[in-house]
Amino acid sequence: MSQSNKYQADEKGMYGRFGGAYIPEMLYPNIEHLKSVYLDIIYSDNFQKEYRALLKDYVGRPSPLYLAKRLSEKYGTNVYLKREDLNHTGAHKINNSLGQILIARHMGKTRIIAETGAGQHGVATATACALMGLQCVVYMGELDIERQAPNVARMRMLGAEVVAAKSGNKTLKDATNEAMRDWICNPVDTFYIVGSVVGPHPYPDMVARLQSVISEEMKVQVPEKTGKELPDYVIACIGGGSNAAGAFYHFLDEEQVKLVAVEASGLGVDSGETAATIAKGDVGIIHGSKTFLMQSEDGQITEPYSISAGLDYPGIGPQHANLFDTGRASFLSATDAEALEAALELTQLEGIIPALESAHALAALKKMTFKKEDTVVITLSGRGDKDMATYRERLGF
Ligand SMILES: *Cc1c(COP(=O)(O)O)cnc(C)c1O
């Protein structure tokens, strides 16, 4: 598991001018402890053996790389889908939650906390906790608890305690604050499982490494399927950026591979109802790291909007901020309407109903031009079951 330095975090967790650990002093001991052990744990034989076995037999990896023939014909190129939607629990998030819970166990922790917005990360974490028999507390905004009832029921059925965050807007940001507070109060027994490549160092680096299995598999699958060493494009949707980070990881140094991240622009980049952080944000500090975020003139974090709950985040992981800064990755955005259209297209051409988040990545096909011989890999980060109510309402089925 080699890694380059150029696009990776340095000792202090900086990616160029982004990243770091801007945290309250009370959190220093927790973060320092994690920082001092996470790499040794991840690359220990014990961890690797158990993690790899779970990825294989519990998650169902490797996830297939599927040549979408009819979609390819339509766009006059070769489109391959990396099928994270086929993972247990229906998305890529389980790769991260299982990895972090094993790290927690290696550190002797017995209690897991997490924050969740739409509930996807909460469900993945509650799943991992049920599997390991560890106590699980998930913080969730009071408003999100109302909006995401099916995922709340799933978490409770899995044995997790779902705690309502009642401050602020009663959404993800407030849930994150509550989780931080819990961690400060329970530093000895508790491990905080963060759901994307965000938060203070070492979280962005740790989560990227755990999700890097996505590109590790692609590196084997692309030559098998195409006879070419490398894909020409890797495309992924981006909320906090964990599925994109995992899909990019082993291609960062292969500069001929074009990396494309697709943000959610909601009702439009300039509509005021958007989650397109790179397009609309500027540099600031959010959840303990320096990165791009959407904020008002007086520095208040603004409420993001997207039809897809998983992309509805006002920041972006610091590694992605640096990939934008250095030009290593390009950033596009897709609106709600474009994502809905792309979801319907995939469904009717390939018989695959994608998650709304993943549909944003698919929407990139209409915004780019490809050559006939190109290999275009799109990460299908999740399946659409959770989004059926929205599809029914918006597409009229
Ligand atoms: C949570 C989620 C995302 C967005 O999170 P990233 O960290 O940006 O990957 C994308 N797709 C699905 C299916 C999700 O559940």
Image (spheres, helix red, strand yellow):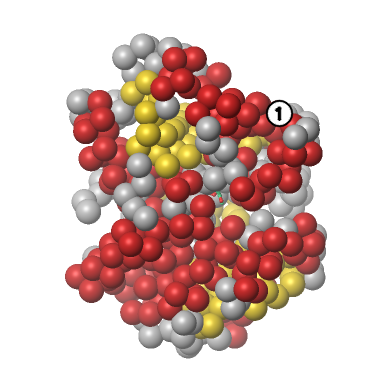
Between 272 and 24, the one lying in front of the other is 272
Circle 1 residue: 337
Residue at 61%, 48% in the rendered image: 385
Image x and y of residue 146, in percent: 79, 62
Residue 347 horizontal side relative to residue 219, left or right: right
> Is residue 217 shown above or below 334?
below
**Cβ of mark 1 under 8 A from ligand 1:** no
Residue at 20%, 26% in the rendered image: 227
Q: Amino acid at mark 1?
A: Ala
Residue at 75%, 39% in the rendered image: 392
Image x and y of residue 186, in percent: 55, 86
Image x and y of residue 40, in percent: 26, 70
> Is residue 239 shown above or below 256?
below
Residue 253 horizontal side relative to residue 191, left or right: left
Q: Secondary structure at mark 1?
A: helix
Residue at 59%, 78% in the rendered image: 159
Please tell me in which quadrant of the rendered image residue 46 appears: bottom left
Image x and y of residue 94, in percent: 46, 59
Residue 231 horizontal side relative to residue 153, left or right: left
- Residue 339: tell me if it is visible: yes
